Image: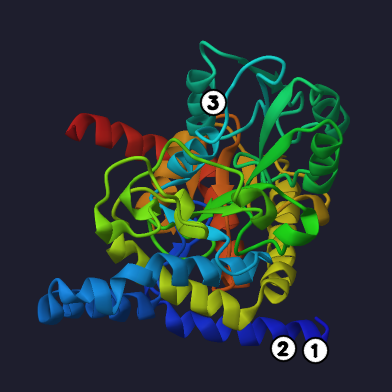
Amino acid sequence: MPSGIAAVQRDLLSYRDEFDSVRNCRYLISNSLGAMPNRAATALADYAAAWKRRGVRAWEETWWMMSRQVGDRIASLIGGAPDSVSMHPNVTSASATVLSCFDVAPPRNKVVMVEMEFPSLQYLYHEWLRDAGHVRIVPCPDGIAVPTEHLLEAIDETTLLVPISHVLFLSSAIVDAKAVIERAHRVGALVVLDTFHSTGVLPFDVTELGVDFAVGGCLKWLCGGPGACFLYVRPDLALDLKPRLTGWMSHDNPFAFAQPPLRRSQGAYRFINGTPNIPALYACGPGLEIAAEIGPTAIRRRSMEMTARLYDLARSHGWTVMTPEDPSARAGTVSIDIPDASPVAAELTARDFLVDYRPGAGIRIAPHFYTTDDDIDAVIAEIASMLSDRSYERQATHQRVVT
């Protein structure tokens, strides 16, 4: 191994000391829930102390501006301007806020989506457009990636929005966001880029891309826990938008408790509604801090090494890999579709190899900067051993009898 690469690995692995949560298991599920940083416990204790000692005064002293402060930290990671990112409880509600800015009516009443989009967002867009428009679904014939040319062909002058994942959650295939944005803008459509599976593991710049909206969260690669998701809105677009999904915190003087009509804030708070999830804003801070310390380029370099190792090991066993072969075409996950993938994944988790299973993808394995090469080798060896002796079948039978 070249000394430069070894030095990078050594530096990144020094952060394992920041994660007691990875000490007693093989933590390979960062695409679903990032490991908890030790600093998060301190941050949550700070929240409890502020509530206990300061009571309602904590709103004015600390809590009121936390959404803006956390949003600005996320903006700095994704290339956004200050006051361009608002915080939301989940990506579905952030996406609904975007939808609520628009009238869905001819001639622009089409939304273009990919077959492999996360179901929650497909449900949202189908239901929202049920009576006033339609959703065009672009197939992914190989179950791994969407053909870029097919996606671009579906975007035309009748398209209102293109909600597209930067990284497809099942296969970890990277979508050509730049090409999609350029095509959408050429025909007058807008793009909602879902960065949940890219933020924290794949460097990108929303300003450079020219993306109109970006949604994502701290739950996965940013190691921030649930409840802290975000919405980026292109600053030159923001002031023209009036989301119907709104509330008192989007008023420019919320404590005036004024009667309608709403007098909208001009910054990121324009796109929030009710009282924010303050504990989640505390919890996500340490993960954002660590991601900024390491930097997205170093994380990406190490991620590509680990996914290549996973990919090659899986293929050496003759297993089907539902992830792009080209390291530059995939993000941080390798999906392995083996026989009986679901019970194997359940048994792996029972043995403290933390992975997950998704229909159509198989077992998803997602290393991060705190992962060792030994973790990767061990999970592949464990899968091979389980398939060889079929021990997962005995465990599944035992569980059924006990139940």
Residue 29, given in percent of the width and then of the height, sits at 49, 55
Residue 195, given in percent of the width and then of the height, sits at 61, 51
What's the distance in space between the residues labelled 2 and 3, CA to CA? Answer: 46 Å
Q: Nearer the viewer, residue 237 or 53?
A: 237
Q: Nearer the viewer, residue 165 or 70?
A: 70
* Quadrant of the rendering where the N terminus is positioned: bottom right
Q: Is residue 221 above or below residue 197?
A: below
| For the residues bearing labels 3 and 1, Cβ distance under 8 angstroms | no
Which residue is found at the position 31% from the left and 57% from the top? 254
Secondary structure under badge 3? Answer: helix
Residue ranking furthest to the top: 131
What's the distance in space between the residues labelled 3 and 1, CA to CA? Answer: 49 Å
| The disc label shown at residue 41, or none | none
Which residue is identified by label 3? 125
Q: Please state if 17 lies on the left or on the right of 159 as rendered.
A: left
Residue 264 can be seen in this image: yes
| For the residues bearing labels 2 and 1, Cβ distance under 8 angstroms | yes
Which residue is found at the position 80% from the left and 50% from the top? 329
Residue 39, given in percent of the width and then of the height, sits at 37, 80
Which residue is identified by label 1? 3
